C-alpha cells in the first residue's frame, strides 16, 4: 500500500498526492485551494469545514473508501457539540488524508467567495477584503530575552501567517497588553493590509473572536447619503440605510454650496462638519439595524462627486466652482477614518475614497467605471449616470472617455410644475392614446392603470399627488408621440391637437393629465415650462454623450447603460423618444441600478478592485464639456425632440413620431425657436 | 583654449572638469559636494553661497584668474541689496565656470553641517534631518489634462528634487490650494522623509519660505522634563527649557506611579494627560523663548525610561511593575505628534521615540548608547547614567551589555537628612582634613571655600542650605578617607575619631558639617542614616555594573563614563572611594554630560542616527538584575566602602583609606553588619 494518497478538491478540480496523515487544510494550502481558516489549523474556528465524498467518482477516476480520511476526532466532536455542524462535514485541519479522497469545499468555507457577479460583463468579483482576522499564539514575555508584546505579536504573525510586518497605533498599544493576558497569549487580530503596502492592526481580542467584522460603503450624494453595511468575511450586505445630506440647508445643488462657501468665510467648515456628522449618524443607524456593535465596523469606502469629496475631506471647494476646476487631489485616499472625524465606528477604522477622474467627474463616476468596466467591453458602450449632474462614460477595450454634464434637477422632478420626488402617489408611468389623446397612468405604490377598475380604491390612501422624474420623461415622450408636442417642444392648442386637454395657460398651452379638484386633489398638468425644463436637461445630457462620441470618432454606440437609482426607473423607449440618449437598438439599453454604490461595495470587499480602479481612472480620457465649442452646437441640436439634425433610425423602426408643428407666427415660443435656428 | 575647466572644492578637495558655463551648484551636485540649496538653483534662497579664490594655489596646482567665474550678475546684486551678502561671496547657482577655479564652501552653506562632535569617540555627527524645505514650481491646472493640485505638486517634487512619492494629510489638502494660488504656483514644502520610508508633506508656504524650521528633543524624566529646541537646518540649539513632570503628584518615583495606576482605575489616563499637557506647555515655553511660531516646530524626539514611555504613549504601565517586566512595545515609534495630543506645535508635526532596550532599560538608555557609542570603543567602557534608576552599559567593539539598577533617589539628595536639590546654597563640594577632621566646603553659586576669606559675604544672599547629591557623595567619601567612617559604613564616636564633630545622635553618631544656628540657619550633619542610604544606592549601582562585568567575563574596565546631568557633577575620585564605580585609573573616569539629551538631539538632527540606534539596540544584550542571584552577592559586597571583597588597586595608589573599625559589640549597626557577613 502506498504511503501517500491522491486528494482531489472540488469545485476547483485541483489535485495532488500527499503523505498519509496530512491534514486536508495543509493539502489545500499547498495546492492553493481556496479554503478559509482564521485559527490557522488549531481546530477552533471551524472556518475550514469540508464535505468529503465516499464511493465512485468516475469523472475523477477514483474510488473513495470510508476510511479515506482519519476518524472523526474529539476536537471535531467538541466543536459540533458547542456550535453545531452539518452532518457529513469535517474540519479540514483535523481530518487527515489516509487514502484517495474527493473533498468538496462548500461556498461558506471559501475565503474568496463571490461578492458581486456582473452579468453584463461576465465578471465575477471575489472577496479579497483589506481587513481579515488572524488567530495567533504569541510567545510569552521572557525577562532573559526582553522584547515588547507588540514585537512578539509581530513575530507570531510572521511565523504563523507569513505577514512580514505590521504597525499599530496608540489605541492598539493601549489595548494589547490586557488583551494578550486575558487570552492567555492567544488572540485574534483584525489586520488591515491594502494595495498601498499598509499593514496595520485595527483591533485585537482575547482568544478566538467570532463577532462581527464589517465595513460600510457610502454613496455620498448631494441630496442623499446611502450606506450599505457589509460583512467583510462573506461580502453580504447586512443592512442598508439612507439619510438626507444635511448640506442641503446650505444649497440645493453643488454650485449653490460652492457659492455658499465663497460668500461665507468658514462656510465650507460648516458643511464639512454637517456631512461628517450625518455619516456618523448613518453609521450608527445601519449598525443598529444590523444589530452589531459599531466598533465592529473596520472599514469605510466613500464614493461621491468632487464637490462632495472636497467638502467631506475638509477642503474648500471654491476651485471647483470656476475654470480650470482644479481638484486639490485627484488620487484615491486611504487614511484613518478618525482623521476625518468618523468617530462612531472603530477608532482604528480605515477610510478609502476612490479617485476622482476630473474636477467635474468624481469618485462616483470612478465607481461606475469600476462596476461597469467599460474598458473590458468588446462593443462600444455608453454609460450614463443620471442625476443633478450626469456622469457619462463612453468606451470599449480600446479606450474609455468620460465627461460630466450639468443636467440640473429636472429629471428628479424639481423645476417641474407638478413635479415631486419618487414617493407613493407620484405618477411614474404614463401613456397617451395617439388617437383619442387621452392619458392613462400608474402611480408609485399601485400596479393598476388609472383607466382600469379598482384604481380609485387602490390609490385612495396615497391619492395622485404629482409626477416624479421617470413619469415626466414618459409624459413628455408620450406627448411627442401623440402629436401634442412638436419637434421644437411646443404644446399645441386644442384646435391643433384636437383635444380639450391641450388648453391655454397664459400665452402658452398645457396638457391636463389629471384633475383631482373634485376630490380636493391636485390638478396635474404638463406645462410649456415643464417641456422647456426637460428639453434643457435632456439636451445637456445628450450633448455630453455626443461630445464623447465625437472624441471617440463614432456616430453610433452599440449599447447604452443607464446607471443610478433614477436610471433604473427610466423607460428606454421614452428616453430615446426624448433624445436623452443616442439612437441604438432599444433592447441594447439596460439599467445597471446603482452602479456607483456597487463600485463602492466592490472597493470595500476587494483590494484588487482598488488597485484596479486607480489604474483604470488613470487611463480614462477626460473631456471637459464647459469649454468645448461643439458642446454648444450639440446642445442646440438636442433641444429638439428627439433631435434637430440626427435621425434616430433604430427608434423610428419601433415608434411613430408625427411630423407636426404647433408654431404660429408671433407666438412667444415660435419666435424663440426661429432665433435658435 | 579648452572649453572646459578644472573646478576644485574646498574643504572637501573634490575636483572635476566642467564645460564653461556650468553653474558652480551644478558642478557641486555632480561631484557630490555638500552645497545647500532650497530653491533648486533659482537664485532666490541664497543657501548655495560660495567663496571663490583667486591667484596661486600651489597645493592644488592651479592658478585662478579673476575671470575664472562668470561676472557678478543682477540676480546676485538683487539678493545682496535685499538681504546682504559677505564681500567675496557668490551664489553657486549663478556663478558659472569660465576657467580653472578653487571654490570654498563655507560651513553655513553645507547641508550636512556638523551637529555634534563627539570628542571621546572621535565621531562627527552631521545634519541629516528628516524634515527639509524644498522650493518647487508646480504646473498650473489644465482643464484638458485634469489632475489634482497635490498630484502636480508630487510631480514637481519628483522632477525638480527627485523625490519619488509623497503623501499628505487632510491638513495639507485643506491648505494646498490657497497656498499654491497665493504663491503663483511657486511654493516651499516642508517634507518629512525618514528611515522607515515615510515621505509626508508637513507644511506648505507660498513662495520661498524663509522662516524658522525647528524640532524639539525632549528628555522626559520622572522628575523633570527637559527640552532643547533645535534649528532643523543647522542643528543649533536655539532655546532650552525645563518643567517639572506633573506626574510627581501621583508618585515621586516610577514604582509609586505604577502603583497609582494599579490602585486607581483610570489613573494611568490621568498621568498620560498630565505629562502630555506638560510637554505642550514646555513646547510653547521654548518657542516663546526662541521667538518662533510654535507652528514652525515640525518634529519632536522623546527619550525616557520605560514607565515614562508607556505613560506618555497612553499605555497602562502595570506590566512594568512586575516580572517579567513586559513592554507593550520595545521598538522605536514614529507617528504623528497629534496622535498623542501634542497639539501646541505644527498639526502635522512628527514624533520619534527611541527604542527601549528592555522593561527596565528604556529609550533614555538607548539615547545614551547612541550618544556614547560603546559599540565603537576599542577599550572596554562602562557607561553609567545616574538617576533614580541607573542605566548601565558595558562594552566595546565586540559586544555591549546593558542593565538598570534601582538606586533610589539618594543620589539626588532625597532621603538624606540635610539633602536638597542642586540649587544655590547647597553644598556641592566638601573636603575633610585627615588630621584635624575639620571640613571645608563650597556651595552652589559661590567659588570660595568655606574656610577662605569672603565666604560669608559671598554666600550671604543664598546662605548654606543643605547638601546636594554630588555633595553627599563627596562628604561620605571624605569621611571614609578621614577615618570618620569605617569600611562597614559606621560613623565613629568622638573618642574613636578624635573630633567633637563626630557626635552622638540617638544610638548612632553623626558628623557635623556646618552649624548655622547662630545665623538662624540650618545645622547640617551627615547622619548614620544618610550613610546607610548612600550605601544602598551605591551598592545597587555597583552591583549592576559588576553583574555586567561578570557577564562580559572581565574583572576590570578600561574606562568609566558618567552620564546624566548629575553624572557631570560627580567627582570621580570620591565616587570611586565610595565604590560606586569599579576601580580603574582615575583619569579614565570622564563625564559625558547629559548623554541621553545628546542622543535625543542626534536622533532629531540625523535620520541615520535613528536607523543606527535601532540596529544598535537590537545588538545590545540585556541583563535583568532583579532575577540574577549574583546581583544580591555583589550588592552585599558593595555595601562596604568601597567594597568588602574587591581591592581597588588603582584607587589605593592615589588615596589612603584608613583601616579603621568603629564597630562596638551590641551597637545596632554592628549587629546588622555581622548578620550581613
Image (cartoon, coloured by chain):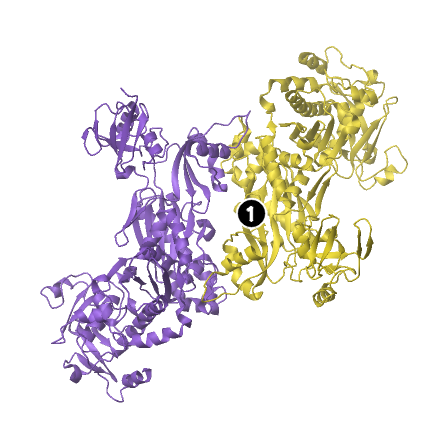
Chain colours: A yellow, B purple
Residue located 47% across and 64% down the image = B326
Dot 1: few (<14), some (14–19), or many (≥20) neighbours within 10 Å?
many
Residue A461 vs residue B312: left or right? right
The residue to which callout 1 is attached is A337
Q: Is residue B643 left or right of residue A327?
A: left
Q: Position of residue A503 (x, y in %)?
A: 80, 21
Question: For the point 17% across and 75% down, which residue is it?
Answer: B482
Which residue in the rendered view is the most extreme toward the front?
A1
The answer to whether residue A622 is above or below residue A95 is above
Q: Position of residue A153 (x, y in %)?
A: 53, 58
Point out residue A216 in the picture as x, y percentages from the top left corner: 64, 47
Q: Chain of mark 1?
A: A
Q: Is residue B575 positioned above or below A359 on the image?
A: below
Foreground residue among A369 and A320: A369
Element class at badge 1? helix
Q: Nearer the viewer, residue B599 or A597?
A: B599
A181 is higher (above) or lower (below) than A504: below
Amino acid at each position: 500500500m502506498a504511503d501517500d494518497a491522491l486528494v482531489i478538491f472540488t469545485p476547483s478540480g485541483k489535485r495532488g498526492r500527499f503523505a498519509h496523515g496530512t491534514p486536508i487544510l495543509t493539502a489545500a494550502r499547498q495546492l492553493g485551494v481556496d479554503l478559509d481558516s482564521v485559527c490557522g489549523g488549531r481546530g477552533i474556528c471551524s472556518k475550514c469545514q469540508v464535505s468529503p465524498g465516499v464511493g465512485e467518482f468516475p469523472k475523477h477516476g477514483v474510488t473513495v473508501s470510508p476510511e479515506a480520511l482519519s476518524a472523526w476526532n474529539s476536537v471535531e466532536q467538541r466543536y459540533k457539540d458547542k456550535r453545531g455542524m452539518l452532518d457529513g462535514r469535517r474540519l479540514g485541519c483535523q481530518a487527515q488524508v489516509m487514502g484517495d479522497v474527493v473533498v468538496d469545499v462548500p461556498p461558506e468555507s471559501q475565503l474568496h467567495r463571490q461578492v458581486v457577479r456582473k452579468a453584463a460583463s461576465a465578471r465575477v468579483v471575489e472577496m479579497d477584503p483589506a481587513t481579515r482576522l488572524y488567530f495567533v499564539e504569541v510567545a510569552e514575555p521572557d525577562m532573559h530575552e526582553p522584547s515588547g508584546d507588540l514585537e512578539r505579536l509581530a513575530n507570531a504573525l510572521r511565523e504563523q501567517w507569513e505577514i512580514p510586518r505590521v504597525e499599530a497605533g496608540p489605541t492598539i498599544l493601549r489595548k494589547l497588553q490586557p488583551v494578550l493576558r486575558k487570552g492567555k497569549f492567544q488572540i485574534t487580530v483584525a489586520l488591515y493590509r491594502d494595495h498601498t503596502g499598509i499593514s496595520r492592526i485595527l483591533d485585537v481580542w482575547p482568544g478566538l473572536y467570532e463577532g462581527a467584522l464589517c465595513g460600510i460603503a457610502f454613496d455620498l450624494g448631494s441630496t442623499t447619503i446611502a450606506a450599505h453595511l457589509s460583512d467583510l468575511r462573506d461580502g453580504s450586505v447586512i443592512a442598508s440605510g439612507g439619510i438626507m445630506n444635511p448640506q442641503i440647508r446650505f444649497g440645493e445643488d453643488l454650485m449653490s454650496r460652492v457659492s455658499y462657501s465663497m460668500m461665507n468665510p468658514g462656510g465650507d467648515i460648516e458643511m464639512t462638519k454637517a456631512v461628517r456628522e450625518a455619516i456618523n449618524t448613518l453609521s450608527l443607524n445601519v449598525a443598529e439595524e444590523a444589530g452589531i456593535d459599531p466598533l465592529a465596523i473596520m472599514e469605510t469606502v466613500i464614493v461621491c462627486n468632487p464637490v462632495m469629496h472636497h467638502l467631506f475631506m475638509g477642503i474648500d471647494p471654491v476651485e471647483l466652482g470656476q475654470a480650470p476646476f482644479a481638484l486639490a487631489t485627484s488620487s484615491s485616499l486611504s487614511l484613518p477614518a478618525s482623521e476625518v472625524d468618523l468617530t462612531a465606528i472603530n477608532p482604528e477604522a480605515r477610510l478609502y475614497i476612490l479617485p476622482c477622474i476630473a474636477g467635474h467627474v468624481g469618485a462616483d463616476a470612478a465607481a461606475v467605471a469600476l462596476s461597469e468596466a467599460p474598458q473590458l467591453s468588446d462593443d462600444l458602450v455608453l454609460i450614463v449616470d443620471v442625476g443633478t449632474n450626469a456622469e457619462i462614460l463612453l468606451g470599449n477595450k480600446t479606450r474609455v472617455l468620460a465627461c460630466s454634464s450639468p443636467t440640473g434637477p429636472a429629471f428628479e422632478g424639481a423645476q417641474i410644475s407638478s413635479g415631486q420626488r419618487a414617493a407613493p402617489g407620484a405618477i411614474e408611468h404614463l401613456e397617451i392614446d395617439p388617437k383619442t389623446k387621452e392619458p392613462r397612468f400608474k402611480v408609485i405604490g399601485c400596479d393598476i392603470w388609472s383607466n382600469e377598475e379598482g384604481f380609485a380604491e387602490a390609490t385612495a390612501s396615497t391619492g395622485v399627488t404629482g409626477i416624479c422624474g421617470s413619469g415626466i420623461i414618459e409624459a413628455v415622450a408620450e406627448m411627442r408621440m401623440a402629436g401634442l408636442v412638436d419637434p421644437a417642444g411646443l404644446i399645441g392648442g386644442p384646435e391643433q391637437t384636437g383635444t380639450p386637454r391641450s388648453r391655454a395657460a397664459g400665452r402658452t398651452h398645457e396638457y391636463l393629465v389629471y384633475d383631482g379638484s373634485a376630490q380636493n386633489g391636485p390638478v396635474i398638468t404638463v406645462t410649456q415650462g415643464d417641456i422647456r425644463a426637460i428639453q434643457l436637461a435632456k439636451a445637456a445630457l445628450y450633448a455630453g454623450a455626443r461630445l464623447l462620441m465625437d472624441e471617440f470618432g463614432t456616430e453610433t454606440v452599440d449599447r447604452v447603460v443607464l446607471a443610478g437609482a433614477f436610471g433604473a426607473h427610466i423607460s428606454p423607449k421614452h428616453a430615446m423618444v426624448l433624445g436623452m440618449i443616442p439612437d441604438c437598438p432599444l433592447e441594447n439599453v439596460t439599467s445597471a441600478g446603482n452602479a456607483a454604490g456597487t463600485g463602492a461595495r466592490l472597493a470595500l470587499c476587494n483590494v484588487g478592485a482598488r488597485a484596479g480602479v486607480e489604474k483604470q481612472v488613470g487611463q480614462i480620457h477626460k473631456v471637459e464639456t464647459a469649454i468645448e465649442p461643439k458642446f454648444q452646437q450639440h446642445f442646440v441640436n438636442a433641444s429638439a425632440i428627439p433631435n434637430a439634425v440626427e435621425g434616430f433610425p433604430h427608434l423610428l423602426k419601433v415608434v411613430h413620431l408625427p411630423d407636426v408643428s404647433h408654431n404660429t407666427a408671433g407666438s412667444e415660443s415660435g419666435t424663440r425657436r426661429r432665433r435658435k435656428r
